[in-house]
Amino acid sequence: MYKRRDTRPVRVGDLTIGGSDKVVVQSMTTTKTADVKATVAEILRLEEAGCELVRVTVNSQEAAEAIRAIKSQIHIPLVADIHFDYRLALSAIANGIDKVRINPGNIGQRDRVEAVVKACKERGIPIRIGVNTGSIERHILEKYGYPTAQGMLESALYHISILEELDFHDIIVSMKASDVPLAIEAYKLAAESFNYPLHLGITEAGTLFSGTIKSAAGLGALLAMGIGDTVRVSLSADPVEEVKVARELLKAFGIISNAVTLVSCPTCGRIDIDLIRIANEIEAYVQNIKAPIKVSVLGCAVNGPGEAREADIGIAGAKGEGLLFRYGEVVRKIPEQDLVSELKKEIDILAKRYAET
Ligand code: SF4
């Protein structure tokens, strides 16, 4: 386990972001926020996939007012995404939002910033400062000529200073760029400069395939340095896919406590069973199981048994059948046609046992 950076813990609803080894998985809805029914339905799907915090656009008074009804039907904290209009921030806060994403330097006059900060303080609501390459202030851009990591840091420090002057410290910061090396550099500078929790993201990363790889490259590099307290994978796809990718990324670093990890072999000439189909069926099955179980699905009896023994439960293929392992012990032989159904049953038993502990 690598060392994670110490950050200031910030409460968001019943979650804490920062100050621990936990990395919170976030996503954002794609519905019109004022459409309560559609927004709630999407959030419930995100919850089921393992999303722990969800952001909605608040771009109108109707959207701000919908927050109360949405909150009453979901189970995870809700974040309002606001760009310039401080009245929408105040309305979102009055309607029970758990966190506001707004850049104080963009709100305008001082009394407006003070009003938002006062309302957040009264209700214990944090503010996320969202810096990205497109949001850098003009004077900073002119200084560097184009978006740079240093410019992004200066922008973040500018917004932070406004909140700190008002004695407000429940701050979370993001430093997003769609350029992976630039985002990595900006987050590294931020981590060296302040200890507010960092919300990681590669913005506008792309489609399900390319965006997943881009996000894994950027967020993976940062997580490997112990940087990042919450992640959002931005994909041009169903947001449930964002959650699936984020959870898979956290699994790769061993920083998720409620997910099934699947180990499966790439197959080779030794293969004796239809391994790729089995692995895909098992992967789909374990997606929503919230238990720290390691499952292995290996193709043959040459390397298979040794590796299957490392897992909590696993199979190693043989001709027309498979060996089932549980905690390193061979449990029984299973005909190939029953491998998927029997492995699912065994996974359910382990998940149930975990839920009861
Ligand atoms: Fe090949 Fe067996 Fe290794 Fe799979 S487990 S890659 S089938 S040797």
Image: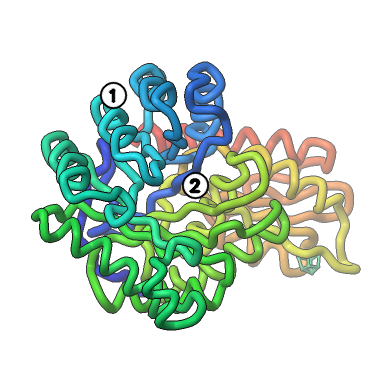
**Residue 348 locus on image (x, y percent):** 56, 34
- The image's mark for residue 95 is 1
Q: Which residue is labeled 2 in the image?
A: 259
Q: Is residue 137 visible?
A: yes
Separation (CA) of disc 2 from disc 1: 33 Å
**Residue 280 locus on image (x, y percent):** 75, 46
**Residue 33 locus on image (x, y percent):** 49, 27
- Marks 2 and 1: which is nearer the front? 1
Disc 1 residue type?
Answer: Asn
**Residue 166 locus on image (x, y percent):** 11, 54
Quadrant assignment for ligand 1: bottom right
With respect to residue 13, does 220 lie above or below? below
Front one among 283 and 305: 283
Front one among 349 and 281: 281
**Secondary structure under badge 2?**
loop
Furthest toward the bottom, the residue is: 144
x 26%, y 69%: residue:
157
Quadrant position of the C terminus in the picture: top left
Disc 2 residue type?
Answer: Ala
